[in-house]
Amino acid sequence: MISDWTLWLEWFIKALVVTLALLTGFAYLTWYERRALARLQVRIGPNRAGPFGLLQPIADAVKLIFKEELTPGKADKIVFFWAPVITLVPSIIIAAVIPWGASFVAFGRTISLQVADLNVGVLYIMSIASIAVYGIVLAGWASNNKYAMLGGLRSTAQMISYELALGLSFVTSIILANSMRMLDIIDAQRSLWFVVVQPVGAVIFWIATLAEVNRAPFDMPEAEQELTAGYHSEYSGMKFALFFMAEYQKMIVICAIAATLYFGGFREFWFLENTFFSVDHTWMLGATQITNWFLGPVYLLLKVIALLFGMIWVRATWPRVRYDRLMSFGWKILLPLALAITFITAVGIILQQELHNDLYYYVGIPGVSILAGLFTVVMVYRELRRKVK
Amino acid sequence: MSVFEPVFELVRGLITSGKMIFEKPVTFQYPEQKREVRPRFRGRHVLKRYDNGLEKCIGCSLCAAACPADAIFVEASENTDEKRFSPGERYASTYEINMLRCIYCGYCEDACPTEAIVLGDNYELSFYDRRSAIYTKESLLEPVPTVDMTTPRKVEPNVYKRSVPEMKDPAD
């Protein structure tokens, strides 16, 4: 029993900050996506509500709140009501283990900028990410609509398939950091980001996350042309907004996870190490000692924005993958490649430790991984050519 | 075609869309910035006047007869030299176009013997009720060239006897 009320207060405040940051982030991600997508399509995008259209999310929220909420007559009312909630909640609580800054001392105690410092943080992320599938499949089923049902089923199949590759790309970065704790993984990337050590793992992670959050080119579950809107066809008003919110919050969270696992998390960019802009840098303002802990969230935000732009860019460019190809890509290409990458990473680290030669780590792992990636591309090409003939 | 062509193509696609960021958006900021309409654009109708300010419309109802959507209603009255609206015997005392019926085909323009009705370049037609969708003569008529040329007006007798202007060149 924790009787220290300040600890409760600290947890409460941190949880509140994360939740509010995600909610605001969701609102402004919709704005960011619409603006960036518009620019990629040589348009301007929403620019009427407020300066640069910054009040657009508020206008959208007001519109959605005042919209009529319809429940289909033959829908399963209880499940229909709870499905959006089941989808939304994991997308928020998954952010609990993501550290968004270094710890600092205030009020005589060390405050770490992380809601829960789990020693199995990565495992927590994996398990929570899987729960979100339930919301989607239940929404599809409860709607009592064949398109929603198909969308929900597709989504489930897709998320389960890509979760394997996603998990294995988590494993590579766990092996590299020799820990499942998010803070340790970030500390291990102090001088060299894992994206450099394991570029193929990062690419697999990226592809799998796109499939995991149902973004283009893997937005199968909500393929408008085939399934109207997929699992949320029958949802309107705020219930629809909850699905929308879940999707965009998942985007933010998954980009933060990508930043943590492969791009150094809240730590400064590699070229700023040991400079004034490092998150560890301590300086004196008069008599007080100040650590740059507050730069952590800034760096994380910058990385998340850059990664989110990648997602939007991909959406603006690549067409949707056909469903059978999506599944065969996940199972026949991505999963074996992820297994090979995990193996290569593990062997590289053992060789480095046993033979005391860092070359195995810094050249061996990325080199052999890229070779494995190229080999995969060659095999895909052969397969495609054989099908054409 | 090399083995890595599919991968290059994916990247090429990204570069192509990425380049677009640096291009100027093609958007027109509509209410403030309007696009020029084409020379033969068929927008809202305008009832024209002669240079001396008299109305071209003589109330012959040929436009109403030509209209496939039955959108035009014309009622004619007699002109006098004391109160003259248009040259000739008659003028349109009522001229209404129902903009909800009009299909902007331009047949009225073709049917008009005096070239009084012309499809203009105004496309901003919006109304809050069906009643205001019926445009009356006052809203369709072109403004007078100068203030003293209003209609109806008193003119010297026996000048404006011909309702349809004489052809300058019969070969036209």
Image (cartoon, helix red, strand yellow):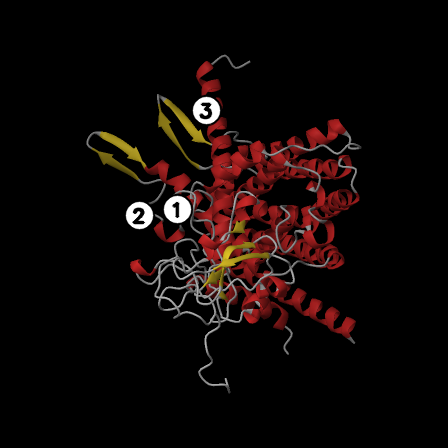
Rendering coords of residue B126 (x, y %): 51, 49
* Residue position marked by numbered label 2 in the rendering: A275
Disc number at residue A268?
A: 1
Amino acid marked by disc 2: Thr
Looking at the rendering, which quadrant does residue A243 occupy? Answer: top right
Q: Nearer the viewer, mark 1 or mark 3?
A: 3
For mark 2, give the secondary structure.
Answer: loop
Outermost left residue: A286
Q: Secondary structure at mark 1?
A: loop
**Quadrant (top left/top right/bottom left/bottom right) for the N terminus of chain B:** bottom right
The answer for which chain carries disc 1 is A
Q: Amino acid at mark 1?
A: Glu
**In the depicted structure, whether residue A318 falls above or below residue A381:** above
- Kindly identify the residue that appears in the image at 26 percent across and 37 percent down: A283
Which one is earlier in the sequence, the residue at label 1 or at label 3? 3
Report how far apart the C-alphas of labels 3 and 2 lie in the structure.
Answer: 31 Å
Secondary structure under badge 3? helix
Find the distance from the CA under tag 2 to the CA under tag 1: 10 Å
- Closest to the observer, B48 or A251: B48
The image quarter containing residue A10 is top left
